[in-house]
Image: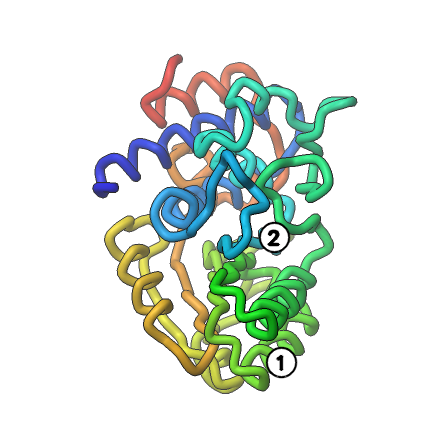
Amino acid sequence: MDQQELERIARNVRIDIVKSVHAAGSGHPGGSLSAADILTMLYFEVMNIDPEEPDMKGRDKFVLSKGHANPALYAVLAERGFFPVEELISLRKPGSRLQGHPNMHYVPGVEMSTGSLGQGLSVSVGMALAAKLDNDPGRVFTLMGDGEIQEGMIWEAAMAAVHYGLSNMTAVVDWNGLQIDGRNEDVMTVAPIGKKFEGFGWNVLECDGHDMAALKDAFAKADEEKERPTVIIAKTVKGKGVSFMEDQAGWHGKAPNDEQLAQALKDLGGEE
C-alpha cells in the first residue's frame, strides 16, 4: 500500500476517534490521536492478519498496552474490516462491546484485554515465548505509552524478553511527551528511553511516529533482527491532527463538545 493511501486511512482513523469519543461523552482522544499512524501502519501494512479469520493460526498479534487509547484501536480494527465502522459510535455505551478498555472476549481482533498500565509488555513476552516454543511464525507487537514506562513491570518484562531471545517481538513507545498529570519530565523523567532499553539488551530504533515511510522502514528493520527483541521509539504529538488538542495534556482524557467536534473535523478534513 502506498504512503498516500496509508495517510488517508490514518486520517479516517482520526475522524473515527473524535466522533466516537464525542458520542461517548468520555474517553481518551489525545493518546489515541498520537498513535493513529502507528496503528494504521501495523494493521494495513506490517501485520499478517485476516479480518475474515481473526483467530487464524500463525497470525501476528498486537497488544495495546496503553489500553485507554482504545478509540484508536477500535477505529483501526473497524477500518480494517473486523467489524462495521458504524459500530464505533457505540463506544462506552451500555450494552456495547466497545467499552472503555479493549476486551478480548467480545471484540474481534483484540488479542488481550488491557487497561492496567505496565502489563501489556509482560503479556507480549508470554505470547512471544509461547510462539517460539510452538514454532509459530506469528510475531508479537506491543504499543506502550511513554508515561506507562514509568511502571516497574515494564522493565521486568524488558529483562525477560532479552533473556529468552524474543526476536519475534517488537515493542513501540508512543513518545508524545505527555501523560495525564502533565509532561513526562515534570512527573517522572523517562528520557533517555533508547539508552534504557539498550541497557537491557534490546535492539533500539527511533523514528518519527507520524511519518509513514519512517515507520515502514523501522518495522522492516525490526523484522531483520533475529537475536533480540526490538523497541521502536516513535516520536509523536499528543492530539495529532486536531489544532486545539495538539501537545495539550488536558486532552488526555476528555471528550470534545459539539463545537469542538466541528472544529476537530474541520482540522482533519472531515465533515464540519
In the figure, 101 relative to 178: above or below? Answer: above
Q: Residues within 10 Å of mark 2 (few under 14, many from 20)?
A: many
**Could you tell whether 124 is left or right of 93 in the image?**
left
In the figure, 135 relative to 144: above or below? Answer: below
Q: Position of residue 105 (x, y in %)?
A: 73, 41
Query: Which element is circle 2 on?
Result: loop
In the figure, 3 relative to 83: above or below? Answer: below
- Residue 233 lies in quadrant: bottom left
Q: Position of residue 254 (x, y in %)?
A: 62, 34
Q: Residue at x 37, y 42 (%)?
A: 44
In the figure, 269 relative to 156: above or below? Answer: above
Closest to the observer: 196 or 110? 110
Tag 2 residue: 66
Of the 4 image quadrants, the one containing the C terminus is top left
Pick whichever of labels 1 and 2 is earlier in the sequence.
2
Q: Three-letter amino acid code at disc 1? A: Ala
Residue 146 visible in image: yes
Q: Three-letter amino acid code at disc 2? A: Lys
Tag 1 residue: 160
**Could you tell whether 158 is left or right of 93 in the image?**
left
Q: Position of residue 1 (x, y in %)?
A: 25, 41
- Residue 27 lies in quadrant: top right
Closest to the observer: 12 or 123? 123
Task: Give the label on residue 80, or none.
Answer: none
* Total residue callouts: 2
**Could you tell whether 135 is left or right of 101 in the image?**
left
Q: Using the numbered discs, state the Cα–Cα distance from disc 1 to disc 2 in whole angstroms.
A: 20 Å
